[in-house]
Image (cartoon, helix red, strand yellow):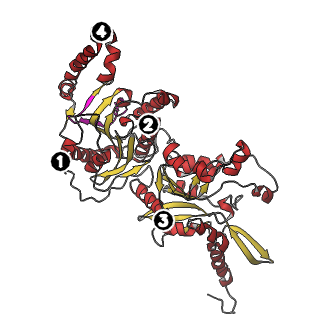
Amino acid sequence: MAEADGTAGWRPEVAQIDLRRKLRAQMGGAEGIERQHRRGKLTVRERIDGLVDAGSFREFHSLAGSGSYQGNTLKSFVPRGSVEGMARLGGRKAVLSAGDFTVRGGSGGSGGGLGNELASNQRAREWKLPYVRLLDAAGGSVKSFEDIGRTYLPDGNGWTQIDVDLLSKVPVVSAVMGSVAGLPAINACLAHFNVMVKDTSQLFPGGPPVVKAALGYDITKEELGGPHIHTRISGSVDNLAHTEEEAFDMIRRFLGYLPANVWEMAPRGATDDDPERREEALVDLMPRDRRKIYKVHSLIDAVVDTGSFFEIAPRHGRARVTGLARLGGYPVGIMANNPRHYGGSTDVAAGGKVMRLLQLCDLFHLPIVSLADEPGFMVGLESEKQGIERAGAQLVSVTCQSRMPWITIVIGRLFGVAGQCHHRPTGMFRRYAWPSATWGSMHIAGGTSAAYRREIDNAEDPDAKRQEIEQRLNAIASPFRTAEATGQDIIDPRETRSVLCEFAEDAQRVLRTQLGEPPIPYRP
């Protein structure tokens, strides 16, 4: 309120706040906004509005940027190339950092030095809140050399060490919303989940001009780092969204399964799906003729809470299906062999998916459910070139080092070292089998020729002798014989949902004892 002598009090300064906020809301100007829309992309402000709960975004660093003055009067203002703040997603608070490509391609930013306010990743760490990056940034720019009048030694790990530390504390999600290069490209993968948008997003350490200078050939951004590369071949990105709005939905869904941080339990969702629901189709799901295949997604949908399965990395490592779901409302991790790809054999790519899921569930206190039909690690020359043995050793290590409650349902095959990766000898572990299950150190059909080579080679009719031995071995391969000797529980497939829901509920008391930072840091 103005003083009695008629002075304006602080109203001029308050008006300055409003003016600067209006200038910041203009982002990089009308031309930059129009260019963003012409490329089929939303602006940073539109993205934030589309992701968060209406009216919940509270911006920080809201006045940061570069102003030009005439005397003490602000004449123009260029905001930073990012927008940061806190908001609610599905009623739960998170920290956001979003690149503004209309301002210098999202490169760099002003600020820094003495008295600088905490960056968004630091706030996520100190507030113990999930961290969401909407990436639309080209990384560093040589134009910055002119701005500061010199070059500099790369020391980005001064910031990146915070991002690495975050991975063992709070859920982190990255969305690739445009052409993302340099350090932002690494930030895309310093996450527990990431997503690209079809036709408008690309990912690479250096774009086509850098490739041309380094390697001498021309290539488009899409050819170099489009979704067909990263969601199918490289596996650097988990999911593909067809629109930005679909990407926002994926972010909200993924975070909905997880706690705000490692010191809290994952939220239980409401469910009206009966834990005792019995699906008749499960009795006949597994074909007797193993040359025929079944739909693993039908299996998953039959046992988890209706509509709750969220698949992660569906286009990469397709011999395994991985994702999150709910059982009796409790969030769980789900992994299953997929016989439609390599017969379900775990290759290097599928093994990588599994390791990331195991780490995620261990970190955020979710039970893991394995629906096992494991023929073994993928064999062959290409598998050897990719380093299947080292990948197998890594999978064994992550499996043995995990702590979260784990339940395996052996629905079909369980062979070799890959088979043992569906078992953990410590902690809360439970295993059931269907009557269709078969197991051992290796397949009878493939192992007979190796183990009985001399006997087969010396026979008058080698092929007949091999078949005779296989029939003899198959006769003792019944899972019921194993159950008689080991106590292995074999269940009616229709009981699967019931035992899984009971396990998920029982797991909660164990999970509460595991709250806090993990003994082994998360590795992306």
Q: Nearer the viewer, mark 2 or mark 4?
A: 4
Q: Which residue is mark 4?
A: 455
Left or right? Give the position of 473 relative to 228. Answer: left
**Marks 3 and 2, how far apart at CA:** 32 Å
Looking at the rendered structure, the kind of residue marked 2 is Gly
Instruction: Answer whether labels 1 and 4 touch (C-beta < 8 Å).
Output: no
Q: Which residue is mark 2?
A: 351
Amino acid beneath label 3: Leu
Residue drawn where x is 35% and y is 16% of the image: 450
Q: Position of residue 40 (x, y in %)?
A: 56, 65
Reading the image, the residue beneath label 1 is: 280
Relative depth, front residue between 232 and 427: 232
The span picked out in magenta is: 420-438
Instruction: Tell which tag, 2 or 1, sits nearer the viewer.
Output: 1
In x, y percent, where is residue 171? Answer: 47, 52
| Marking on residue 51 | 3
Contact between marks 2 and 4 (CB within 8 A): the answer is: no
Please name which of the two marks, 3 or 2, marks the residue nearer to the observer: 2
Q: Give the residue furthest to the bottom.
A: 5
Give the mark, 4 or 3, whose residue is nearer the N terminus: 3
Which quarter of the picture shows residue 442?
top left
Q: Residues within 10 Å of mark 2 (few under 14, many from 20)?
A: many
217 relative position to 243: left or right: right
Q: Residues within 10 Å of mark 4 (few under 14, many from 20)?
A: few
Viewer-nearest of labels 1 and 4? 4
Q: Are marks 2 and 1 in contact (CB under 8 Å)?
A: no
Alpha-carbon span between mark 3 and mark 1: 40 Å
On the image, the x and y values in percent for residue 9 come to: 67, 85
Secondary structure state at the residue bearing disc 2: helix
Q: Secondary structure at mark 1?
A: helix
